[in-house]
Amino acid sequence: ASSKLPNEKDSIFTIMGHLARKYNATDLSQGFPNFKTDAQLTHLVSEAMARGYNQYAPMAGVIELREEISKKINHLYHKKYDPETEITVTVGATQAIYSAITAFVQKDDEVIVFKPAYDSYEPTIKLNGGYPVLVQLEGDNFKVNWEEVENKISRRTRMVIINSPHNPTGTLFTREDMLKLEHLLKDTNIILLSDEVYEHLIFDGQEHQSAALYPSLGERAVICASFGKTFHNTGWKTGYCVAPKALMAEIRKVHQFAVFCVNHPVQQAFAAYLKSPDHYLELGRFYEKKRDFFLELIKNSKFKGSPAAGTYFQLLNFSEITDESAVDFSQRLVKDFKLASIPVSVFNIDQKDNKQLRFCFAKTDETLEKAAMILNKF
Ligand code: PMP
Ligand code: GLN
């Protein structure tokens, strides 16, 4: 039978998670916290269930939740999104990304994707008959070559996808990057998909460069976010996207028929919980401490990396240890040393020579200590 995605296999997250369980390994591969979400939040979910919020939610999301999202964005990025028409609650950021790409990308359209990239963008573009146009991030700091982007933008370019803080590298777009992007997209009809799921996970006093902060980007931007990343409950698969009214109307057409609506009691709980900004404003400091704890434990090992600027991922270079490919070494690490990680090369254009592994530090100190003990053996 013909396949619409002939080259897709199980994702690296599925493969590594499986190996981690099979070898009973310490798992720093797939990005999720191994500590509990706030008990207040689980209480709010069960309370919402007990109060009877067990049927379909409104198609675009619980209005009180959309109002809280609107307030938050206005507070942090000084842009007003109308809760009625410009905000939609989705099944995680993944469904927001899927719905936005599906709403706008038509056959033979091109979409600029920076590599390495989160793995859902390209298959979704292809499912819609579009072409990912790949731009490799360059150097140890994974900087954008904006000249290359300019050269790759064509009459067919429908969308540019950005992701800051960036998975898997932990790097950030700077203000200069955003201004370059603004300049390139000015006077075009290109839509910007800005994946901001790690917006609160930013370290060392740096600031998140939301597309919402830049007026000429905001007017063409679909911004995606994930409660799973922010509130330590990736398994609840709840997130949202915001966009100007005309764009959101198109996204909702897809959303309506992909899922119709999202888990109702969870939305009720987030609506109540988001009333206190402390819950997300403390997050950067929390994860910065985790990052520092982990790096301090391995500072004398042969694994080298500059501290992640954002996200909960730390890249470590292993070229002092072996010439193996990142895929081979990550397999050996999980099978023989019982530590699971993600080889960055699988997200690259150039598969072969990248010698970095991604370690998720959204883990208890105990788990990070276990992982460090293994890394210190090399
Ligand atoms: N974008 C990026 C960059 C991510 O890392 C993730 C989570 N792995 C997602 C989107 C998807 O988020 P969610 O789990 O809310 O669907
Ligand atoms: N965002 C997670 C990560 O990068 C993976 C989520 C998934 O498995 N799709 O590890």
Image (spheres, helix red, strand yellow):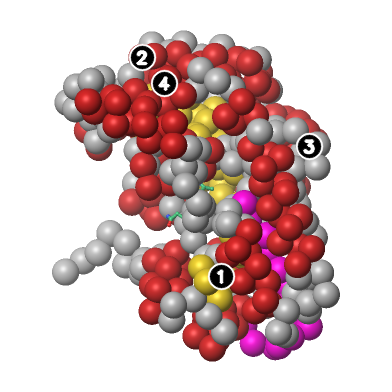
Residue drawn at point x = 75 percent, y = 43 percent: 203
Drawn side of residue 172 relative to residue 371, left or right: right
Image location (x, y in percent) of residue 44:
36, 27
Could you tell me how far apart the alpha carbons at marks 3 and 4 are, in whole angstroms?
28 Å
Drawn side of residue 202 relative to residue 231, left or right: right
Could you tell me how far apart the alpha carbons at marks 1 and 4 are, in whole angstroms?
34 Å
Q: Quadrant of residue 18?
A: bottom left
Q: Are marks 2 and 3 in contact (CB under 8 Å)?
A: no
Q: Tell me the magenta residue range.
A: 312-325
The three-letter code of the residue at mark 2 reads Ile
Quarter of the rendering occupied by the N terminus? bottom left
Residue that numbered label 4 is attached to: 271
Image location (x, y in percent) of residue 252:
32, 25
Residue that numbered label 1 is attached to: 341
The three-letter code of the residue at mark 4 reads Ala
Residue that numbered label 2 is attached to: 63
Residue that numbered label 3 is attached to: 206
Drawn side of residue 174 relative to residue 223, left or right: right
The three-letter code of the residue at mark 1 reads Ser
Residue 239 seen in this snapshot: no
Could you tell me how far apart the alpha carbons at marks 1 and 3 are, in whole angstroms?
27 Å
- Name the foreground residue: 293 vs 326: 293
Query: How many residues crowd mark 4 within 10 Å: few (<14), some (14–19), many (20+)?
Result: some
SS for dot 1: loop
In the image, the residue with mark 1 has its CB under 8 Å from the nearest atom of ligand 2: no
Image location (x, y in percent) of residue 303:
75, 74
